[in-house]
Amino acid sequence: MLFLFSDCSEQDAPTRIRTGSHRDVAALLHLAGDAGLSFMELAGKLGELPDRDEALATGNAGTVYLCHPFLVHAAQLHRGTEPRFLAQPPLLLQGELTISGSATGYTPVEVAIRAGTGAGSTG
C-alpha cells in the first residue's frame, strides 16, 4: 500500500511505478524455483526485466494506492517546493499464496502471479 499524507504532484517526487512489472517479477521468481530469491538477489535482477511504461503515484492527501506485492517501484528526486509525506505499510496475507491446484479459485494477487508464470488466470 502507498498512502499519500500530503498532496503529491509530478514535481513532488511521486513514487515511480512500472506498470505490469508484477507479472515480470512473478516470472523471475518462478524461474528460481522452490529456492526462490532473496530480496537483494531479486533486486539485482530487476535490470533484466522488459521495459515497461511508468506511472506516477500522484494525488491529493488521503489517496491510497493498493499495489500488488511484486510491483516494481522507486523513488525519485523532489523538484517541488512543499515536503511530501507518505507511508508504505504492508498489507499482510491471511494465509499462503496458492499458485496452482486451488479447489476454491484464486485471489486477484494469485491470478496476477499465475499470469506472470504462464499458468493462466483461472483454475
Image (cartoon, rainbow, N blue to C red):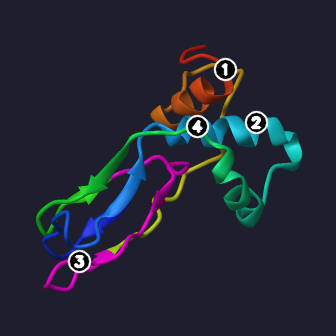
Q: Looking at the picture, how far across and down is residue 14, in whole percent? A: 28, 66
User: Which amino acid, by three-letter code, is at mark 4?
Assistant: Pro
Which of the labelled discs sits on residue 30, or is there none?
A: 2
Q: Is residue 41 left or right of residue 76?
A: right
Q: Is residue 31 left or right of residue 54?
A: right
Q: Determine crowd level at label 2: few under 14, some 14-19, many 20+ residues with C-alpha closer than 10 A.
A: some
Q: Tell me which residue sits at (66%, 20%) in the image.
A: 118
**Counting residues from the N terminus, which is met first, the one under dot 3 or under dot 4?**
4
Q: Which element is circle 1 on?
A: loop
Q: Is residue 10 left or right of residue 18?
A: left
User: Between residues 100 and 82, which one lies in front from this camera angle?
Assistant: 82
Q: Name the residue that disc number 1 marks.
A: 118
Q: Is residue 36 on the magenta stretch?
A: no
- From mark 4 to mark 1, how far is it between C-alphas? 16 Å
Q: Tell me which residue sits at (29%, 71%) in the image.
A: 13
For the residues bearing labels 3 and 1, Cβ distance under 8 angstroms: no
* Residue 59 found in image quarter: bottom left
Q: Give the magenta-colored segment's residue range.
A: 66-86
